[in-house]
Amino acid sequence: MITDQADDTDRVDGGVQAVTKNLVSALIGHTDIELHILSFNYEVSESSTASCDNYTKHVLPGAPLGTVSAFWQDQRTLNAKLDTLQPTIVHGQGAGHDGIVARRSRFPSVITIHGIMAEEAKHFATFGQRTRHRLLNMLSEHYCIRKGQHTILISQYVADYFNGRIAGESHFIPNPIAANFFEIQRAEEPGRVLFAGRLVPLKGVLDLIKAIATVAHRRSIELVLAGSLVDRRYVDRLRDEAKRLGIKNQVHFPGILDAESLRQELSRASMLVLPSYQETAPMVIQEAMAAGVPVIASRVGGTRYQVREGETGFLFDARDVESLTSRISELLANQAMRQSFSKAANALAENEYRADTVANRTIDVYRQVLG
């Protein structure tokens, strides 16, 4: 499996890392699978290998010029490692760098599409970032979408978006959620709102701060913004806006949470709010549903297939701060509604998202690849 893997601190930064962690944990319970995880690291100069809990982790040095300009060097590095391992199947997590090099290897491949880069590229802050992402999207379209052998789609939205352009066999399998998210004991703190994700413009966090400021005029409220603080310019802008709106002490920036800390936050949260401008099938929505946390999310990409309007949560149009404010106020004011959403969300997650179930369906795909 070629993927972006979380570091040893158990702090997951992004959905692909969470998928990898949960899927690996479920796959290693199958004794007929010998699992190797390969990840590129652009800060190391030599490969390393470590034995983990029933799988082997390999870290490969990434070409220093980046994933597009030095693509061919990364491919040579990967091919050399695969020639040593001689895998039966190569599974690329994502249709970007890792999916492309997986498809271009000489081994049978499976690619899971996690994000749609053409849409994500529109929301990057700088011209350089947008250009780099668009070039990566061109490679993805060529190798992963139009020439893929077997593709795992985590949402119907992916199939809708590519509209028949996906080659080979497609398989619908949602992202896996670890069992301990289903075991969270709810200890809701009324007025505690959770956002979990990278603090970047794409996620619409500034809109959320504006909505919280309006709600704060009428009731007690706390906002927890859990996620990467790497984009310092945007984080500073968020802090400045919270200060300007008079809610500086009610907005908290804990950074990336480890799995246990995230579960604790989900236990305490009245709701999860995700006001993104683009999403495919965000893991955090499924984690919240497993924990029985009502969700308010922007109606973008695949979120409309995850959140059942008026049953497990609310949807609103992205960038519509007034509508977001109204939905937060409505849900905070109605405890019975929150409890109803909680029960329905957990039941849906139980049926669809448990990691063991997802792992079994993934293994079925591997068997189809092998004929």
Image (tube, grey):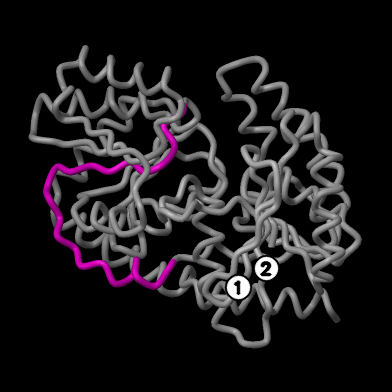
Q: Check if residue 192 falls in the magenta segment.
A: yes
Residues 59 and 184: in front is 59
C-alpha span from label 2 to label 1? 6 Å
Q: Check if residue 146 falls in the magenta segment.
A: no
Residue position marked by numbered label 2 in the rendering:
36
Residue at the spot x=87%, y=52% of the render?
104
User: Of the residues under marks 2 and 1, which one precedes in the sequence?
Assistant: 2
Q: Cβ–Cβ below 8 Å for labels 2 and 1? A: yes
Name the residue at the front extreme. 46
Tell me which segment is drawn in magenta.
Answer: 178-200
Q: Is residue 127 left or right of residue 140?
A: left
Q: Is residue 115 left or right of residue 6?
A: right
**Residue 264 image offset from top left, x and y in percent:** 24, 57
Mark 1, Cα crowd under 10 Å, few <14 / some 14-19 / many 20+, is: some
**Residue 93 image offset from top left, x and y in percent:** 66, 55
Name the residue at the top extreme. 244
**Residue 56 image offset from top left, x and y in percent:** 63, 69
Residues 193 and 370: in front is 370
Q: Main secondary structure of the magenta part?
A: loop
Q: Amino acid at mark 2?
A: His
Q: Quick one: SS at disc 2?
A: strand
Q: Quick one: SS at disc 1?
A: loop
**Residue 174 image offset from top left, x and y in percent:** 56, 63
Q: Is 186 above or below relative to 129? A: below
Q: Is residue 124 left or right of residue 325?
A: right
Mark 2, Cα crowd under 10 Å, few <14 / some 14-19 / many 20+, is: many
Residue at the spot x=41%, y=67% of the render?
349
Residue at the spot x=66%, y=56% of the render?
48
Q: Amino acid at mark 1?
A: Tyr
Q: Is 316 above or below relative to 213? A: below
Residues 297 and 336: in front is 297
Residue position marked by numbered label 1 in the rendering:
55
